[in-house]
Amino acid sequence: MKIAFTVKEVCKISFDRYKHYIMPDDWTYPSEWNDWSVDEKYTWVNNNCHFKNDFAEETDSEVIDEVATEMEIIQ
């Protein structure tokens, strides 16, 4: 299973990145998953799954904050 997030990163320059992650084969949703916001789901996936790639040009600006705004399950 693959999962992707649109993440707004706040830097000196703000831009959206469309991030793809690969979920482990034995991955199951945490019991609280349905109660979480998209940003909380993104944080969990970012910490527990394998980052695959993203679509955005990187800048030299330091990321100050990031908030996920959309989620897509890719089957």
Image (cartoon, rainbow, N blue to C red):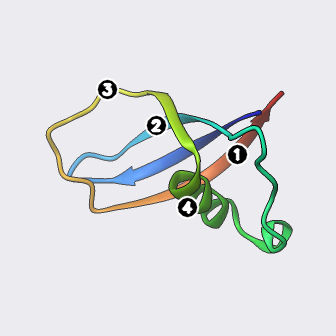
Disc on the earlier residue, 2 or 1: 2
Q: Nearer the viewer, residue 44 or 57?
A: 44
Whole-angstrom CA distance, mark 2 to mark 4, is: 15 Å
Disc on the earlier residue, 3 or 1: 3
Q: Amino acid at mark 1?
A: Met
Packing grade of label 1 (10 A; few <14, some 14-19, many >=20) is some
Which element is circle 4 on?
helix
Give the image location of residue 45, x and y in percent: 61, 53
Question: Are discs 1 and 4 less than 8 Å apart at CB?
Answer: no
Packing grade of label 2 (10 A; few <14, some 14-19, many >=20) is some
Q: Amino acid at mark 4?
A: Thr
Residue 71 circle label: 1
Q: Residue 73: which quarter of the image?
A: top right
View extreme (left): residue: 60
Which element is circle 2 on?
strand
Residue 17 circle label: 2
Q: Nearer the viewer, mark 2 or mark 4?
A: 4
Give the image location of residue 5, x and y in percent: 61, 43
Which element is circle 1 on?
strand
Residue position marked by numbered label 4 in the rendering: 43
Disc on the earlier residue, 4 or 3: 4
Task: Give the total of numbered labels.
Answer: 4
Q: Residue 36: which quarter of the image?
A: bottom right
Whole-angstrom CA distance, mark 1 to mark 4, is: 12 Å
Whole-angstrom CA distance, mark 3 to mark 1, is: 20 Å
Q: Amino acid at mark 3?
A: Glu
Q: Is residue 11 left or right of residue 37?
A: left
